Image (tube, rainbow, N blue to C red):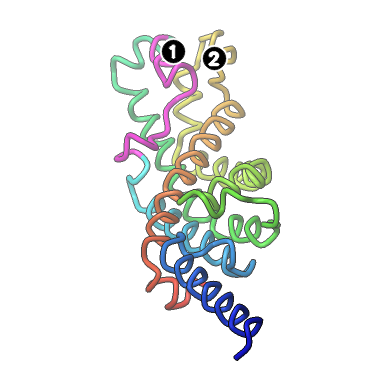
């Protein structure tokens, strides 16, 4: 073997060792996964998050994602409602908002899947460097689209759980409700924003868990 052949063989061995090191130590070697793989990862995280938040009471139980009335995390609403709050009516309304968020989450899988399928992943270095990189990329790239699609689901859910009716009853004769965002449209917008924030919060956790479990990925997530 001449000197050039020896050098070539050495380079190949070093390259193979480097590749093996990257596969072992990089988080799922995301930089080398095909587009379908990245989308499979975030689709799995999306489905897992939506399933958990669709369970009855899930939003309200977890204070990290609990949906509150508009206005200083619900504090302004409590002051404006006055006696209604003393009777516990705002608490009932808040629970209804969270029930609506759960219902919307239960119907949102096709919406999230469509947004994921439409994404382009070519300019997303955070996919490699962060455990929740795909979730954050989806939030940044498709957040507006998801808001538009999820908002009608939230509105329907608010109607079905009686949140609009409760709001109308509490708002009777109170002229300050609209300025605080306590209208049907304002409530829908606020609940949609908070529900999406909670979904992305759960998705980030699901994505991180999937990255830590390569065996699960090999069983069909991709």
**Residue at the disc numbered 1:** 76
Q: Was residue 88 drawn as part of the magenta stretch in this picture?
A: no
Magenta highlight range: 60-79
Side of 142 relative to 160 (left or right): right
- Marks 1 and 2 in Cβ contact (< 8 Å): yes
Q: Which residue has dot 2 on it?
A: 180
State the image coordinates of residue 108 (x, y, percent, origin top left): 54, 54
Residue 23 higher or lower than 142, as above or below:
below
Within-10-Å neighbours for mark 1: few <14, some 14–19, many 20+: some
Residue at (40% x, 50% y) in the render: 205
Q: Quadrant of the N terminus?
A: bottom right
Q: Relative to 201, does residue 79 appear above or below in the rendering? A: above
In percent of the image, x 37 and y 61: which residue is there? 212
Residue depicted at 66% across the width and 62% down the height: 117
> Percent x, y for residue 67?
42, 33
User: What is the residue that sits farthest to the front in this orientation?
Assistant: 2
Callout 2 environment at 10 Å: few (<14), some (14 to 19), or many (20+)?
A: some
Front residue of this view, candidates 189 and 6: 6
């Amino acid at each position: 073997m001449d000197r050039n052949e020896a050098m070539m063989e050495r380079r190949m061995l070093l390259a193979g060792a480097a590749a093996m090191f990257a596969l072992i130590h990089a988080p799922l070697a995301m930089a080398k996964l095909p587009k379908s793989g990245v989308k499979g990862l975030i689709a799995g995280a999306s489905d897992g998050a939506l399933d958990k938040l669709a369970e009855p009471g899930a939003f309200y139980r977890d204070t990290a994602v609990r949906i509150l009335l508009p206005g200083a995390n619900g504090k302004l609403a409590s002051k404006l409602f006055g006696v209604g709050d003393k009777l516990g009516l705002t608490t009932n309304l808040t629970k209804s908002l969270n029930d609506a968020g759960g219902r919307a989450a239960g119907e949102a899988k096709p919406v999230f899947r469509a947004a994921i399928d439409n994404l382009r992943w070519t300019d997303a270095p955070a996919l490699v460097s962060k455990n929740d990189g795909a979730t954050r990329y989806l939030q940044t790239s498709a957040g507006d689209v998801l808001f538009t699609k999820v908002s009608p689901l939230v509105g329907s859910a608010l109607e079905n759980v009686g949140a609009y009716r409760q709001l109308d009853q509490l708002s009777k004769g109170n002229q300050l409700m609209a300025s605080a965002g306590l209208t049907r449209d304002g409530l829908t917008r606020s609940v949609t924003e908070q529900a999406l924030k909670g979904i992305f919060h759960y998705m980030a956790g699901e994505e991180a868990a999937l990255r830590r479990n390569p065996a699960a990925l090999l069983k069909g997530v991709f």
